[in-house]
Amino acid sequence: MIENGMVLPHKYLDPVEPMEIGNCSGCEHSVYDGEDHLEFDDVLLHDDSTCLTNYIRDNAEVRR
């Protein structure tokens, strides 16, 4: 029996869901494999100024 190649799964044409690697500590949204991100210690952040600013504001000491 010959299979119809047009209906078989194809690893190059079928979309693959990106793997979630964690949550951003700045915006609390998911970070997916392949996205630009920063990792240090136990912190994961999107490589985005908004996420970086939120993380710093939430974790820095305010001194006056």
Image (spheres, grey):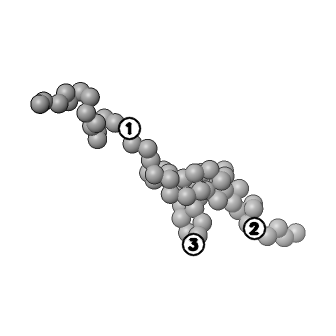
Give the image location of residue 2, x and y in percent.
Answer: 12, 30
Residue beneath disc 2: 60
Q: Which quarter shows the N terminus?
A: top left
Taking the image as drawn, is residue 30 in sight?
yes
Q: Nearer the viewer, mark 1 or mark 2?
A: 1
Q: Nearer the viewer, mark 1 or mark 3?
A: 1
| Gap in angstroms between the C-alphas marked 1 and 2 | 41 Å
> At 44% from the left edge and 47% from the top edge, which residue is drawn?
18
Residue beneath disc 1: 15
> At 26% from the left edge and 28% from the top edge, which residue is drawn?
7
**Sooner in the amino-acid sequence: mark 1 or mark 2:** 1
Give the image location of residue 25, x and y in percent.
Answer: 64, 59
Q: Nearer the viewer, residue 41 or 8?
A: 8
Q: Residues within 10 Å of mark 3 (few under 14, many from 20)?
A: few
Q: Secondary structure at mark 1?
A: loop
Kindly give the residue lying farthest to the bottom in the view shown: 41
Q: Nearer the viewer, residue 64 or 56?
A: 56
Q: Secondary structure at mark 2?
A: loop
Any mark on residue 46, and which? none
Is 61 situated left or right of 18 in this image?
A: right
Is 62 situated left or right of 44 in this image?
A: right
**Sooner in the amino-acid sequence: mark 1 or mark 3:** 1
> At 57% from the left edge and 62% from the top edge, which residue is drawn?
44
Is 56 situated left or right of 61 in this image?
A: left
Q: Secondary structure at mark 3?
A: loop
User: Marks 3 and 1: in contact by CB < 8 Å?
Assistant: no
Residue type, label 3: Asp
Residue type, label 1: Pro
Any mark on residue 41, and which? 3
Is 62 situated left or right of 28 in this image?
A: right
Give the image location of residue 55, x and y in percent.
Answer: 69, 60
